Structures are given as structure tokens and as C-alpha cells.
Image (tube, helix red, strand yellow):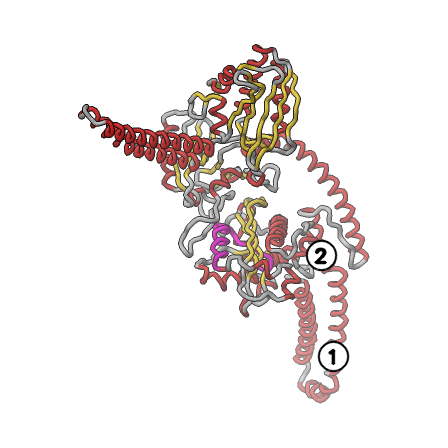
Amino acid sequence: MRPAIKYWAFLLTIIAVIFAILLGSFIGSWFYLDPGDREVVRALFDKLILFPLLGGLALVMIIGTLVSLLFRFYIIPVLLLAEKARLITTVNSAYRITPTGAREIIYLSEVINDSAEAYQKLQTEVGAQIREAKNQLHEERNRLAALMAELPNGVLVCNIGGQILLYNPQAQAMLQSRHVQKTDHEPRDIWVGLGRSVFGLLSRDLIVNALELLQQGVNKGQQAPISSFMATLRNGACLRISMTPVFAHQGERHEMSGFVLSLEDMSRQIATNSRLDMLVQSLTENLQKSLEPIRSAIQTLLQTPNLKPDQLVNYGKTIDTASLKMQQQLSHAVEEYTRVQHESSRLEDVLADDLFSILERSLKKHYSIEVTGQADAGLHLQMDSYSFIQSVAHLAGVLRIHEDIKRMQIDIRKTASAQASVRLLWAPAGMPIPLIKDWKNALLITGPKGQQLSFLDMVNQQGGNIHLEVTDQETCLGVLIDIPATHKETRLEIPAQPEARPVNYEFDLFHQEIGIQTANQPLRECTFVVFDTETTGLSPSDGDEIIQIGGIRIVRSRLLYNETFDQLVDPQRSVPQASVEIHGIQPELLVGQPVVEQVLPRFHKFAEGAVLVAHNAAFDMKFLQLKQARAGVRFDHPVIDTLLLSSIVHPTWGTHSLDEIADRLNVTIVGRHTALGDAIVTAEILIKLLPLLQAKGINTLQEARRASSTSQYAKMTF
């Protein structure tokens, strides 16, 4: 109950008691008098009644003043003191109480502040000990994160109910898409996130079938069963997926508690194989067509031996033309095959300086050859560096054996927009040209399909060539190797991530019961989507529109900074300057952005299965509810409001604005009045409100919603 209500209830109760006592005394005295005395009192009543009433009013004023002083200097300061003390011991040990009220309350505040200093110091020491005790666990988790982040394949770890417990960036990149072709009202996003269902990403039937195969393997006593299958995503990508079980050990029994999915994108390989199949098919058809006139001419020659000279010439020309065409077709096929192989090969991005340094060290160590020359600074090469270095080392060995070469010049230069050259010179000594040709054609390298390749084959497959630098027809002084340079704009294949180890995991979900989220679920175990909107104004019912929506997910009290939603919205109306001064979103930034009917289905998908949270949620929800019918979705999620929750845990505080709550709970504000920035601040506030709610006996979602309905702010409408 609010202090103001307590004050008036207490004061009115005292007034009622005083006048009840006066009235009771008068009635008792009246019945005690005999009839004669009653007549006398009745005659004097008008003169006597004024003084008891004045006395009663004076007594009420005195008592009311004393009650007001009591509330002002004792009761309200004590209530505030209790809330602030709980704030210190629960979520913000750095908070200090500003003493107010009576002298005794001020003294008590100073004692609590002193205790808070000691508590904070103790908490710091205990925290350091806890962190030290958890170092080994954190180290193991960091190793896991490092391993998962560097894996070339995508990885998903799920519990037996299909909830995602862990994913790495590669899996997120493979599965998450915003450009899937769908029907008009179906969401356009596929979201990968902790606690989300894997069945929203991959076919349920495929996963269930793979689980059944795994279970059969476990039943047969297999220690590490594996089930593999192919899956085609809605964006057309084709994945090869391997599933392995995760076991929960219970004594001697061990049962599957989850599974690991390893994802490999086969789209590129399938496309390459298809192109090669088409190439073979096209070549076969063209050769058959070219062979027909040759066969016809040969049959005629065999069947008609006495042809005239001019006829023989014509048939010879026919055969020559057809064979030339076949030669051209074969040459074209070889070029196309080389190009396909080059495009499908996984080349490395190698810095020219690094390649030069490795060659310099390798030739010095193994062949005692001094290397001079230089590499262009900042030049990136696209190559199979291991095979390249091995081949150059082989050449150095040949030079050392035959001519005892002790010096070699290596220059790595950029020659064109997409080409570079590696020049190897061993002048003035010359080498026989056949020896160098034997080197470049020697089968030294095994290709990706097991075929033997020469160094020349490898360079050709990578889009380059080898040129000999000769002085005459017999002597070679060096070689010039052309190789592709990396395009600057495509060199980084993996975008930078905001966190050092962008691997996301929540293994506590292994133990979460399978089932839908209910009202009795503990708040600490809920999945929340905390969101905020920026709008053209404050009147959703009078035509104001959303111009930005931002949201962030919380899973089991953990804020997931890389699972966010942030989208500008074209309001299709003007944006008042007064609104721009608050959120800073210029109208020209909104031109060409998706309209709200396109954005809401995406946000609805992002918030699927979660509790919606906002600060002053009635305002934001009103905007969503007014547009949901046109967007073809319905926001029927449970909703909680940090404004209401704050008023429940701190009823004595005067205001509950986002800035004041953040300051109270020691939450740093960044990006204020941007949708995502405010959503993140609200999410951090919610996490800090949870222990305060628990201290008041509010533990479940249902209890939080019931308590919120009693707040004085719960009646606000927009």
C-alpha cells in the first residue's frame, strides 16, 4: 500500500474513533439522565454542543498534525530506508542512502551506509574468491568457445525437445535469412537463438527420423552412433547434416538428453558438380554431332574407292572441318573445366610479405640458398600456399643439385587489378630449359579428388600461368608465376563480431522440462524479448506511427547481445520536428525503409515463444495492436512492464522513469532514445529487478502480472 493511502487511512481512522468516542459518551450520558435532567439538557443543547465539537475538531487537528509529522519524519523515511537497504544488498552495493527524516532516522541511515561500505568490501573479496574458483570452468568454456568459433562447419547443440542450447556464427550464417520467399503474411525471417526450436529451422521429420536411428544405435550398444542426412532450406541452400547424441548419465544408465548437429553447406559443391555434369553432357552431344560428318565421309571413302580427285578433296575438307570443330570443342571444355575447378577450389588469403618470409626461411634452412628481393606491402594473394611453397622448394633443390645455386631473387608484385606475379631469378647461372619444364610438369601435388597434379596444373587451376625467362633456346634464367590477387572488398569472408568469442550457449536448458511456457514458470527461467519503439508522436490512436522497433532477447536471466532486432520503419507520413529532437531520426533516413505491415511479421517471429517486456508497455503495445490486423499477425504474448514492476518493488519512490530507475539500479545508459538502445537498458533493468521481486515473494510470471495489476500506473491508457 502506498504511503499516502496509509496516511489518509490512519488519519480518517483516528477522526472516526474520536467522534465515535464523543458520540458514545453523549449517548451514554443521555440514557443515564432521568426525564427531568433530559429536559434540562435538551433546553441547553444548542449552547453546550458547540464546545464539544470545537474541542473535537481541535483534537483532530492536533492529532492530524502529529500523524503528519510522524509520517514525514519517521514512517516514510523508514519505508524508503528499507527499500534502499534492500537495493544495496540485492542489486547495487555501490548505492548510498542520502539521510533524511528525524535525527534517529539520519543516524540509522549513516549506520546502514557504513554497513554498506563493509558489505561492498566483503562482496568484492568474496566475488574475487568466487571468480578465482570458477577460473577453471571459465577456461574450459572459453576453450569450447574458441573451438566452436574456429570450426569451418556450423554447429548446433539441442536438448531432446529440440531447443537450441548452443550455436556458433557459422550455423547462424547458414540458417538465418531475411530474404526467404514466402507468402504475403508469413514472416520473412528465420531466427537462430538460444531457447528457440530447431524445428523452425530444419524439417521436423528429418530430425525425428535421425533421432530414431540414433536411438536404435544406442539400443544396439553403439558407443558413438552418427546419423547423417541432407536438408534443403527454404532459401534454396543445401546442407549436409551429421547428428550425434548427447548423453545424460544416471548411475549405470545413460540416456540421450540432446543431440549435436554439424552443418556443412553443400550448395557450392552441388552447383559445381551440376556445372561439370552439364559440361560433360554438352561435350558429349557436341562430339557426337561433330563425329557424324566424319563417320559419313569415312564410310563413303571406304565404300567408294574410285572417287575423283575433287571428291576426295571435298571429303578431306569435311573431315578437316569436323575435326577442327571437335578440337575447338575440346579446348573450350578444358578451359571451362579449369574455370569451374578454380571457382570451386578453396584458396587461402595469403599476405605477400608472409609468403616471402616463409620462402626465405625455408630455402635458407633446407638448401642454404640466400634469398633477396621484396614483396609489395599490403598485397594479398589467393593461392594454395602449402603446395606453392613445396613446389618452389623442389625447384630450389633442383637448382642446388645441378648448378650449385647459392642465391635466388624472389620478387612478389601486383601486376593488374586482379593479378600478381612471383618472379624467381637465379641469374647469372643458367639452367637447361628441359630441366625447368620437367620441374613444372612433375606430378608433385594431390588434388582435392585424389588426382595427381603438376605445379603447372595447380597454377592453371587457380587462374594463373608459368612463364620461363630464357636467354636462348637452351638456357633458363628464371620463371615468372602469375597468380590471382585477392579483391579488397571480398578478402574478409567472416564479418567482425562484437564479442571476442561469438559462440552462444546455455546448457541449463538441458534440464528444462519440455512444454510450453506457462504462467507458473519462474521469472528467472523465462525467455523475454525486451523491446522499445520510436514514434512520430505520443498519440497512437490519433495517427502517430512507428518509425523504429528495437528488441533484445533474454534467456534464463542472460542478456543475449547478439540476438537483437533493430529496424527503421517508413511511417508514410511526416515526422514532426519536436519528435526528431527527441529520437534524432531524420525523416530522410526513413525513405525506402519497409513499412510497418512488413516489419511487424518479422518482429512477431523474433518474439515467438517469449514474454514481451517494455517500459511503459501500454504505450508500445497500443501501437502494435493497432497495426497487427493489417500486418496479418497477433501479439498475444504475455506482457510485463518494468515501470509497473519498479513501482511494486519501490512504492515509496516518487518517480519511475527509465533514467531514474537505471540510475537507481546502477545501469549504464547508452543509446538513449533509440529503440534498440532503450530496449537494452530496459533489459538490464529487468534482470536487476528480478531479485528485488523475489525478495517481495514475486517469483513467477503469473505473480508478477498479478502484482503489476495493483500498481497505480496500471490504469494508464493511450
Identify the residue at image location x=70%, y=48%: 88
Camera-side residue of 19 and 487: 487
Which residue range is magenta in the image?
Answer: 597-617
Query: Would you place residue 41 above or below residue 578 in this image?
Result: below
Which residue lies under the disc numbered 1?
A: 52
Image position of 218 (left or right of 396): left
Q: Above or below — where is 668 with respect to 244?
A: below
Please say if the residues under marks 1 and 2 sit with CB atoms less than 8 Å apart.
Answer: no
- Counting other residues with Cα less than 10 Å from the Cα at mark 2, is it few (<14), some (14-19), or many (20 or more)? some
Judge whether residue 715 is colored magenta.
no
Quadrant where the C terminus lies? bottom right
Q: Is residue 96 above or below residue 11?
A: above
| Label of residue 432 in the image | none
Q: Secondary structure at mark 1?
A: helix
Q: Which residue is mark 2?
A: 80
What residue is drawn where x is 55% and y is 18%? 472
**Quarter of image, res 160:** top left
Looking at marks 1 and 2 on the same chain, the residue that comes earlier in the sequence is marked by 1
Q: Amino acid at mark 2?
A: Leu
Give the vertical position of 186 relative to 557 (above or below): below
Disc 1 crowd rating (10 Å Cα; few below 14, some 14-19, many 20+) is some
Q: Position of residue 605 (x, y in %)?
A: 47, 51
Inspect the magenta stretch and tell me whether residue 601 lies in it: yes
Instruction: Pinpoint residue 75: horizontal percent, then vertical percent.
Output: 72, 60
Tell me which residue sits at (57%, 62%) in the image.
619
Question: Comparing marks 1 and 2, which lies closer to the viewer?
Answer: 2
Q: Is residue 718 in sight in this rendering?
A: no
